[in-house]
Image (cartoon, rainbow, N blue to C red):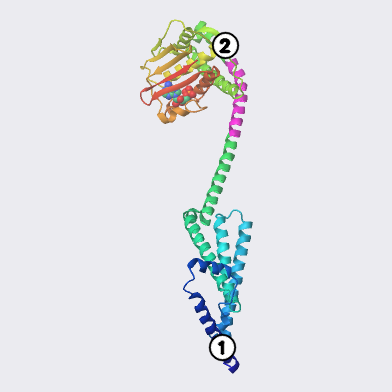
Amino acid sequence: MTDTTHRALLQSSAVCDSMCNKHATISGQPNLSFFAQVKEFFVKMFSTVDWPPRWHCGSWTDFHGWLYILSDLSIWAAYFAIPFLLYRMVKKRKDIPFHTIFFLFIAFILLCGTTHLLDAIIFWWPAYRLSALVRMLTGIVSIFTVYALYKIMPMVYNLRTLSDVEAEITERKKAEQEAETRLVMQHAAEELMARKDEFMSIASHELKTPITSVKASLQIIERIAEKDGNMQEAAPFVSKAVKQVNKLTEIIHDLMDVTRIQGGKLELVKTEFDLMEMISEAVEQCGADDRHEVTIEGDEVVMIHADRNRLEQVVSNLLTNAFKYSDESKPVTISVAKLRDGSVKVEVIDRGIGIPTNKIEHIFDRFYRVDNSSKYFTGIGLGLYISSEIVKRHNGEIGVNSTAGEGSTFWFIV
Ligand code: ADP
């Protein structure tokens, strides 16, 4: 240390001592009450007469003093830059949650910076009151910040992390892709269905004419065979051929009906008729082979207003199924009942193979056949679909109650 510096330091400590003594005298005034002290604090906020500048208090070397000052100034500079950047960030990214806590942080850091600035300035300008005030404000704001931070902590814990969001995005993309694939497959299935319908429409129309001609020819041959003794041997084969052609005709009619239903062209011709009479006729036609005992229950006459041929088609279909899907020995019952609202309920009850519960919801779908029955019984799965469409066109209801192995009750209300 040079002589001059040493002298200056001695001098400054001397100033400090004298000032400290002076200060001790002031604050030591016994008659200065607490409120008087507070008043004095604010009144003399910027007064520096009570203390020497910090340079003159104690024995600072240049290095120590400037290290203190420059460190304080750099802390202050950083503490002023951080809030500025934080503010820009919050302003730009409106989606950042918890804005209030960011503003509390900004105030807190600014005040901390100011305390450091004042600490540096005090080396020349001993504004200890102002410094205390700023420190008090910093203390208050920091307590608020701690409280606010504590309050939002549970919410922060619940915030989704980046990996959560990424996982969610991946999941969503996967779901979207699956939905897209499903849509493509659905379109493909619809297109396939449309082509199938188109094919069915063309095929059934093209088949109808030759089959009608074959049927007519066979009927003529059948009649000739009945009369001509020489053709007696051929007669059973001819009637077998007629039966098969009839079956073929039924299939073609079913296919044509499906085409009509799909095109919304299933027309109804409604008339007033006796339902019981129509049912008897249907039983006669279906049960011509007398293999099943059929009982019809209900009033003698039940007049309804509907499409006779179409409803007969429904009854015939339900009856044919009842025969087809039950043993020959098992009886079939057709029950007709008038309901309170004026409609009529027809039930076709069999004691056949029944339908498994999980298949019932699909039973009226186009081309649907229950696996086990499709193996052992002929059919193409259109009868119930057409029947349900006919009943629906009558604004009626159709359904089934069934237990596998015990039998089924198909019913419709019109
Ligand atoms: P198909 O009899 O030509 O297969 P349907 O549309 O009439 O077509 O019937 C659809 C399916 O419903 C049948 O394949 C059969 O599995 C089932 N089913 C219909 N009626 C009965 C019945 N009475 N008992 C048991 N299963 C039936």
Residue identified by numbered label 2: 270
Residue identified by numbered label 1: 9
Residue 47, image x, y percentages: 59, 73
Three-letter code for the amino acid on which mark 1 is drawn: Leu
Magenta residues, as a range? 190-214
In the drawing, what numbered circle is on residue 89?
Answer: none
**In the orientation shown, which residue stands out farthest toward the front?**
31
Foreground: 257 or 232? 257
Quadrant of image for the N terminus: bottom right
Residue 238, image x, y percentages: 51, 14
Residue 204, image x, y percentages: 59, 22
How would you rate the neighbour count of disc 1 (Cα within 10 Å): few for under 14, some for 14-19, many for 20 or more? Answer: some
Point out the tag, 2 or 1, that comes first from the N-terminus: 1
| Quadrant position of residue 330 | top left
Q: Secondary structure at mark 1?
A: helix
Q: Is residue 213 magenta?
A: yes
Does the image show residue 240?
no
Give the residue at x 42% y 31%.
358
